[in-house]
Amino acid sequence: MTVLGIETSHEHGSIGLCCDERLVGDILFSTELGPGERLLPALESLLALTDIERDQIGLIAVALGPGSFTSLRIGMAVGKGLAQALGIPIVGVPSMAAYAEKVSFLSGKICVVLPDRRDLVYYALYEGTTQITPETSSTIGALQEQLKRMADLALCIGPGAERHRLALEPIVTVAPAALNRPSGAVIAQLGALKHSHLHQDELWTLEPLYVHHLLAKAW
């Protein structure tokens, strides 16, 4: 099955395709000038590059965030519209899960960090692909203090880690920049896995993942 993945959580978005769990293609674009104007042209370019027709898409997976409220809503609206037009199911995938998936081969804990406003970030801990703490919002300073007390911490990954690389690198290894970019194809891959297990269409239940601000949280 061919799956379309949409990721518009932050200032960079991505749209990607996977087919039978194989990553087929990925396009990265800026959302700062409006993800709504970028998504459909990016989709047409991706389909042309991969020689796939719209009616070959069997499932849509969309990132749930946390992230920019407006950008997430636009990504979901485009995904839902395409799903209805094509008569196919749609599922949601937490954005952090896609970054954890990229480095799931590592031993030790992974801290996924996504950007929020100013010096705020969202973060959660993973072991492999298993999330072991809830998504939390924090200042970068509070996160630094938490990381200093962490044992068995292998890596920080995500666009929030990239944005605050200078603050985090004295404490923990930060993933290479290429791994900190969003991937619609990985969202598609995780969406395919979710749908194969649950066989659900989430068209009427999809909502962005909201995280309330909290200055510090003990692990």
Image (cartoon, helix red, strand yellow):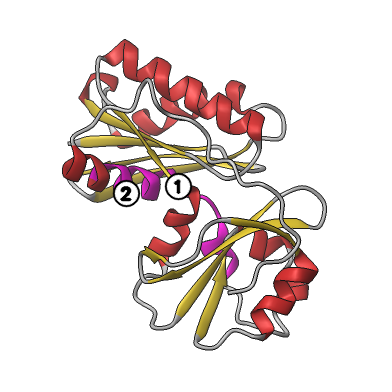
Q: In x, y percent, where is residue 88?
A: 25, 21
**Is residue 119 located in the magenta-colored stretch of the structure?**
no
User: At 58% across and 41% down in the image, what residue appears?
Assistant: 210
**Secondary structure beneath label 1:** loop
Quarter of image, res 4: top left
User: At 67% across and 42% down in the image, what residue appears?
Assistant: 11
Q: Amino acid at mark 1?
A: Pro
User: At 57% across and 24% down in the image, what residue appears?
Assistant: 74
Q: Amino acid at mark 2?
A: Leu
Q: Is residue 3 above or below residue 141?
A: above
Q: Which residue is label 1 attached to?
A: 94
Quarter of image, res 35: top right
Q: In x, y percent, where is residue 112?
A: 54, 64
Q: Is residue 95 above or below residue 167?
A: above
Gap between marks 1 and 2 measured at Cα = 9 Å
**Is residue 186 located in the magenta-colored stretch of the structure?**
yes
Give the farthest residue toward the bottom: 151
User: How would you classify the magenta stretch by its main secondary structure?
Assistant: helix
Is 72 on the left-hand or right-hand side of 121? Answer: left
Q: Residues within 10 Å of mark 2 (few under 14, many from 20)?
A: many
Q: Which residues are magenta?
A: 176-192
User: At 66% across and 38% down in the image, what residue appears?
Assistant: 68
Q: Which residue is label 2 attached to?
A: 190
Q: In x, y percent, where is residue 199?
A: 18, 35
